[in-house]
Amino acid sequence: MYPILSLIALIAWIVGLYKILTSSMDSTKKILWALIVIFIPLIGTILFFVIRPDKG
């Protein structure tokens, strides 16, 4: 069970980083969000998908 959850978390983390780096946000916001997602992986990824600052 836990390997499957870990795989799902890893995929969400990769997708989150991809969406951050390809978004239309300015560079400063991209860097800040990328650092949050890198250093606090699970919580940072969830926050990014919930808040989605590039929705406009």
Image: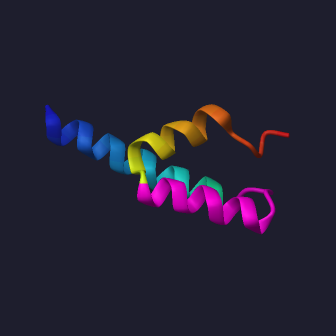
Q: Which residues are magenta?
A: 21-39
Image coordinates for residue 17, horizontal then vertical, percent: 54, 57
- Residue 27's place in the image compared with 53, above or below, is below
**Magenta stretch holds residue 30:** yes
Who is closer to the viewer here, 43 or 52? 43
**Which of the image's four quarters has the C terminus?**
top right
- Residue 17 located left or right of residue 20: left
Q: Residue at x 59, y 37 (%)?
A: 49
Who is closer to the viewer here, 9 or 42? 42
- Residue 48 located left or right of residue 37: right
Q: Write down the quadrant of residue 12 in the picture.
A: top left
Q: Residue at x 53, y 50 (%)?
A: 16
**Which of the image's four quarters has the N terminus?**
top left
Q: Residue at x 41, y 50 (%)?
A: 41
Judging from the image, the colouring scheme is rainbow
The overriding secondary structure of the stretch rendered in magenta is helix
Q: Write down the quadrant of residue 52 in the picture.
A: top right
Image coordinates for residue 4, horizontal then vertical, percent: 21, 38
Q: Write down the quadrant of residue 9 in the picture.
A: top left
**Magenta stretch holds residue 34:** yes
- Residue 25's place in the image compared with 43, above or below, is below
- Residue 48 located left or right of residue 14: right
Q: Residue at x 45, y 56 (%)?
A: 14
